Image (cartoon, helix red, strand yellow):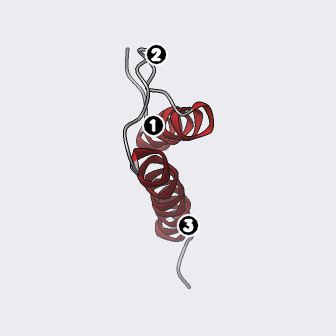
């Protein structure tokens, strides 16, 4: 399967957010200690980077005068 960077980052963000919301890893194991907050912050940070990459990609495709 061939996926682009935006899709890969979106999937990672969704998994991190799901774990933070449920308090569990995808395997069902509980997140220890402050891991819930770490997952929430990582999701936020990756989503922000994903959006910045999308803007940069658009700028690269915009013709220059």
Q: Which mark is residue 12?
A: 1
**Residue contact between numbered discs 3 and 2, judged by CB atoms under 8 Å:** no
Please state if 63 lies on the left or on the right of 30 as rendered. Answer: right
Quadrant (top left, top right, bottom left, bottom right) of the C terminus: bottom right
| Separation (CA) of disc 1 from disc 2 | 17 Å
Instruction: Tell me which numbered mark, 3 or 2, is placed earlier along the sequence.
Output: 2
Residue displayed at 53% across by 80% down: 64
Residue displayed at 41% across by 53% down: 38
Viewer-closest of 10 and 53? 10
Instruction: Tell me which numbered mark, 3 or 1, is placed earlier along the sequence.
Output: 1
| Separation (CA) of disc 3 from disc 2 | 36 Å
Viewer-closest of 62 and 58? 58
Return the x and y of residue 18 as percentages of the image width and height.
58, 33
Residue displayed at 41% across by 34% down: 31
Viewer-closest of 59 and 36? 36
Q: Nearer the viewer, mark 3 or mark 2?
A: 2
What residue is disc 2 on?
28
Residue displayed at 50% across by 32% down: 15
Return the x and y of residue 55 as percentages of the image width and height.
56, 66
Return the x and y of residue 46 as percentages of the image width and height.
45, 55
Return the x and y of residue 33 as percentages of the image width and height.
38, 46
Residue, far right = 21
What residue is disc 3 on?
55
């Amino acid at each position: 399967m061939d996926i682009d960077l935006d899709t890969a980052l979106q999937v990672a963000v969704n998994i991190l957010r799901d774990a933070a919301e449920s308090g569990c890893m995808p395997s069902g194991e509980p997140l220890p200690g402050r891991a819930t907050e770490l997952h929430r912050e990582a999701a936020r940070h990756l989503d922000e980077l994903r959006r910045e990459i999308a803007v940069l990609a658009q700028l690269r495709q915009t013709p220059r005068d």
